[in-house]
Image: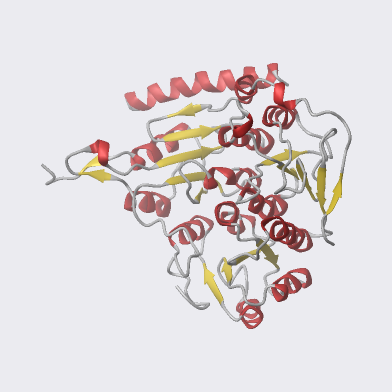
């Protein structure tokens, strides 16, 4: 291993040890444009919320954020989505003062990646609710610590809600919680879209249609939803689900962007959606890595990241862990705002992702202090994305001197 990587590996080893100790101690247009790139109910729960008094720095330390950083990357570590979600929430909302706290949080069950993708829209204006994860109706230690530090107080925008319990997500004791219900992924996503529209007081500019059974293709929609406020709805490959059809008809003039290739959402479904919406377009790549890049590059009628040049933020997560990728969506709607990119291997950066990062690599001619910069959030622990891959990502994000710029 080269000397630089040895040094990085040593630092990561210390970071991992620290993290373990902390956790143990704290418990184009048209379909062919693939190459261009039951209503919510409220539950008011009694009890005094004393979360505001909890030291945020201590909570962040227990959660191990950040676990390791380089010049151009910051890792949000954690072996479980609950740990990642908690660390992301505190990174976006440090909560050391009331103005830094979110009005509310959205809580999803650890087995519901579709709910997490759909609920990411609640991070968009005007709600700004980060995601936390529950398990079996209870909050894991990481989620409890983050919730205590975040201290959501509710607001006029959230209709007084301090938490949104998504599907089987937990309803924290002592917080006014709005339950968002749905018997399946499509119904739940439609309920979330309806709630967000009610809280925002206006219909969305666009709708994203994602495949319900292809999480690795659907999850890039979470980052876009958090950034834009465009809701995510779900469909089966060869059948437009009833709840989704109803939701689309209720927004008949809103353009729909179908995310994923025809192998995930068929041409038959696309044509039906186009007929309902009057305007449907497909954004797709054949593999999960390419599909995420297609959405990152895409731009049409105010839809899409249009990240085709340097000077942006990025989030990189594993395609095999859609929940961890989805709960990182607040990072795409704050700080250095940017798209979610996917890697499909812990040790090796996929070629399409490497080529994309190289294409948007920043450079300067004479003055680096006046240049544009890239920053990349790396999501997950060493088993998800190891230090060698993080080091390569760092190199691709590094500002470079352009020859002939003397």
Q: Position of residue 364 (x, y in %)?
A: 22, 43
Q: So how many labels did they put on this image? A: 0
Residue drawn 37% across the image and 57% down it: 308
Q: Nearer the viewer, residue 1 or 309?
A: 309
Left or right, residue 310 beside residue 346? left
Q: Residue at x 19, y 45 (%)?
A: 402
Q: Is residue 43 left or right of residue 13?
A: right
Residue extending furthest toward the front: 156
Q: Residue 292 at x, y = what percent?
A: 50, 56
Say if 144 sits above or below 288 in the image. above
Q: Nearer the viewer, residue 363 or 17?
A: 363
Q: Nearer the viewer, residue 16 or 163?
A: 163
Q: In the rendered image, which quarter contains the N terminus?
A: top left
Q: Horizontally, is 276 left or right of 68 in the view? A: right
Q: From what the image shows, is residue 267 above or below residue 235? A: below
Quadrant location, the C terminus: top left
User: Dividing the picture into quarters, in which one does residue 3 lie?
Assistant: top left
Q: Report whether residue 383 is seen.
A: no
Residue 173 in view in this figure: yes
Image: 36 above or below 77: below
Image coordinates of residue 260 in percent, x first then y, are 56, 65
| Quadrant assignment, res 79 | top right
Q: Is 91 situated above or below 295?
A: above
Position of residue 156 measured from the top left corner of the image (x, y, whole percent): 72, 47
Q: What's the residue at 33%, 27% (across, down)?
A: 2
């Amino acid at each position: 291993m080269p000397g630089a990587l040895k040094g990085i590996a040593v630092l990561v080893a210390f970071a991992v040890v620290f993290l373990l100790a902390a956790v143990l101690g704290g418990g184009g247009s048209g379909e062919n444009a693939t190459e261009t790139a039951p209503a919510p109910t409220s539950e008011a729960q009694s009890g005094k919320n004393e979360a505001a008094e909890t030291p945020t720095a201590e909570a962040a330390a227990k959660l191990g954020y950040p676990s390791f950083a380089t010049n151009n990357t910051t890792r949000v570590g954690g072996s479980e989505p609950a740990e990642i979600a908690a660390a992301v929430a505190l990174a976006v909302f440090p909560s050391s003062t009331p103005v830094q706290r979110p009005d509310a949080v959205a809580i999803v069950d650890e087995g519901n990646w579709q709910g997490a993708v759909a609920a990411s829209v609640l991070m968009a204006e005007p709600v700004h609710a980060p995601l936390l994860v529950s398990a079996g109706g209870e909050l894991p230690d990481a989620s409890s610590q983050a919730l205590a530090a975040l201290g959501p107080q509710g607001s006029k925008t959230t209709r007084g809600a301090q938490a949104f319990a998504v599907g089987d997500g937990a309803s924290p004791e002592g917080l006014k919680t709005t339950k968002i219900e749905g018997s399946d992924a499509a119904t739940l996503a439609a309920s979330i879209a309806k709630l967000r529209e009610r809280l925002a007081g206006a219909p969305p500019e666009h709708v994203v249609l994602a495949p319900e059974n292809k999480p690795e293709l659907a999850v890039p929609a979470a980052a876009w939803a958090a950034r834009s406020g465009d809701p995510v709805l779900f469909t089966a490959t060869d059948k437009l689900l009833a709840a989704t059809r109803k939701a689309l008809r209720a927004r008949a003039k809103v353009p729909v962007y179908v995310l994923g290739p025809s192998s995930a959402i068929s041409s038959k479904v696309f044509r039906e959606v186009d007929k309902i919406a009057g305007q449907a377009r497909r954004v797709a790549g054949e593999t999960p890595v390419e599909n995420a890049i297609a959405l990152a590059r895409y731009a049409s009628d105010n839809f899409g990241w249009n990240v085709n040049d340097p000077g942006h933020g990025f989030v990189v997560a594993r395609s095999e862990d859609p929940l961890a990728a989805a709960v990182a969506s607040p990072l795409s709607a704050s700080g250095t705002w940017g798209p979610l990119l996917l890697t499909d291997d812990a040790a090796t950066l996929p070629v399409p992702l490497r080529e994309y990062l190289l294409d948007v690599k920043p450079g300067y001619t004479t003055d680096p202090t006046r240049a544009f910069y890239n920053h990349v959030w790396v999501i997950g622990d060493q088993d998800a994305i190891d230090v060698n891959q993080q080091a390569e990502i760092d190199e691709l994000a590094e500002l470079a001197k352009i020859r002939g710029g003397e």
